[in-house]
């Protein structure tokens, strides 16, 4: 028999948590497989807890547990400590899952012997407005998000990361728990840590997740600038093995744009190089926008998506550069927190085996 412990961190997810839980309860369970569902709520005040309690009242497999830290990694670590399952399935409250999600993930994990198994994200527009469609088009385009295979599709095989994750619980004894200093990027860091330790992360594109991003472009950009981008830099500081070119290229782009604008007036050659580079960038952006306009049958993407690409790439880069500056000046939030485990060290952001699950 396989017992799968499903851990769902959430906070202020009134509009999504019920659909998420109902999709989990609709999972097709292979013979001999049982589940427990541990929902760690960050003390929501928007009705999320009532929605969870209502669903839990009809199914004893669901447990609502407080997460006063409001940090996803803290919820995941708490869940791993109390979970009874042989496998740990980490889910996101902001998503919905097809009935075959667990069965297909379990079958893939057993077939491949992977330490962590996952699939691909099918990004859906969160609402009927044009800005929701714009965000969807941006993050499902390789020009927008680079070689993030789980967002833009790919072949089955080993990967550097997968969304959410289906872990054999032994992996946490071997490589440790989630780094609670990372408010963002904790999933990517632990996947890279698994690979660094000689383990395997496996992506099967047949495993699909429906994901709902921000409903408007300003909310999306704000999240990237304030949270996602700086924490890329913080993650590299805590765990250098987690560095990925696709996370850093926007910083190079932003620095190039700023430098080009400042120096073009003084140096003819720089002005020429900068002009050619930006012309090439917007040519590629327009071509990508036309591709996305045809894909989603939305002609407005041809006009607005090139601008959205630029703002996303530039402001994400500014966020990464800001994170690097804060690290250099010793003012980053991760430098204000003591090492989470004795002897962890900056480049080994996980505990020794003896303390991994304590």
Image: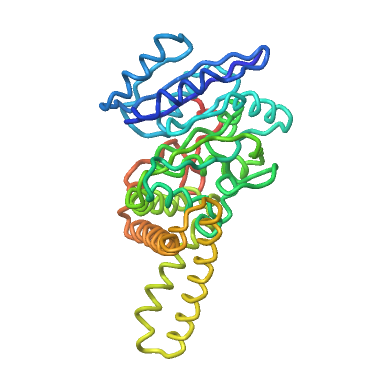
**Way the structure is coloured:** rainbow
Where in the figure is residue 291, as x and y percent of width and height?
56, 59
Q: How many marks?
A: 0
Q: Residue furthest left?
A: 45
Q: Residue at x 50, y 48 (%)?
A: 239
Q: Residue 86 sits in which quadrant?
A: top right
Where in the figure is residue 46, as x and y percent of width and height?
27, 27
Q: Seen in the image, is 138 located left or right of residue 111?
A: left
Closest to the observer, 326 or 183:
183
Q: Residue 147 sits in which quadrant?
A: bottom right
Q: Is residue 171 above or below residue 337?
A: above
Where in the figure is residue 118, as x and y percent of width and height?
60, 35
Q: Residue at x 32, y 46 (%)?
A: 336
Quarter of the image that includes the N terminus = top right
Q: Is residue 4 above or below residue 198?
A: above
Q: Is residue 271 above or below residue 32?
A: below
Q: Seen in the image, is 90 located left or right of residue 174?
A: left
Q: Residue at x 37, y 44 (%)?
A: 215
Q: Residue furthest right?
A: 111
Q: Seen in the image, is 114 located left or right of residue 52?
A: right
Where in the figure is residue 345, as x and y percent of width and height?
47, 45
Closest to the observer, 137 or 151:
137
């Amino acid at each position: 028999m396989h017992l799968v412990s499903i851990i769902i961190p959430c906070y202020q997810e009134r509009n999504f948590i019920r659909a998420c839980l109902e999709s989990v309860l609709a999972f097709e369970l292979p013979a001999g497989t049982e589940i427990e569902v541990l929902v760690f709520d960050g003390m929501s005040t928007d009705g999320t807890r009532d929605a969870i309690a209502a669903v839990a009242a009809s199914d004893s497999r669901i447990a609502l547990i407080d997460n006063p830290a409001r940090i996803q990694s803290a919820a995941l670590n708490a869940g791993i400590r109390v979970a009874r399952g042989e496998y740990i399935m980490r889910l996101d409250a902001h998503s919905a899952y097809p009935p075959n999600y667990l069965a297909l993930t379990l079958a893939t994990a057993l077939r491949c012997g992977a330490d962590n198994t996952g699939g691909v994200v099918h990004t859906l527009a969160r609402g009927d407005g044009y800005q929701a469609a714009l965000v969807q088009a941006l993050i499902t385009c390789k020009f927008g998000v680079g070689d993030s295979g789980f967002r833009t599709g790919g072949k089955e095989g080993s990967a550097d990361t997968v969304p959410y994750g289906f872990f054999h619980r032994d992996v946490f004894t071997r490589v440790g728990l989630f780094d609670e200093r990372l408010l963002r990027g904790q999933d990517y860091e632990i996947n890279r840590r698994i690979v660094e330790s000689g383990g395997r992360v496996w992506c099967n594109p047949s495993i699909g997740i429906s994901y709902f991003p921000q409903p408007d472009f300003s909310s999306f950009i704000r999240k990237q600038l304030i949270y996602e981008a700086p924490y890329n830099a913080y993650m590299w500081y805590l765990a250098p093995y987690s560095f990925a070119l696709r996370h850093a290229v926007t910083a190079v782009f932003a620095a190039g744009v700023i430098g080009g604008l400042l120096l073009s007036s003084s140096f003819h050659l720089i002005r020429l190089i900068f002009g050619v580079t930006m012309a090439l960038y917007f040519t590629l952006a327009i071509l990508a926008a036309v591709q996305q306009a045809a894909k989603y049958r939305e002609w407005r993407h041809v006009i607005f998506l090139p601008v959205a690409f630029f703002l996303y790439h530039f402001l994400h880069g500014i966020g990464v550069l800001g994170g690097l500056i804060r690290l250099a000046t010793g003012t980053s939030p991760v430098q204000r927190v003591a090492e989470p485990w004795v002897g962890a060290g900056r480049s080994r952001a996980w505990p020794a085996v003896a303390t991994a699950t304590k």
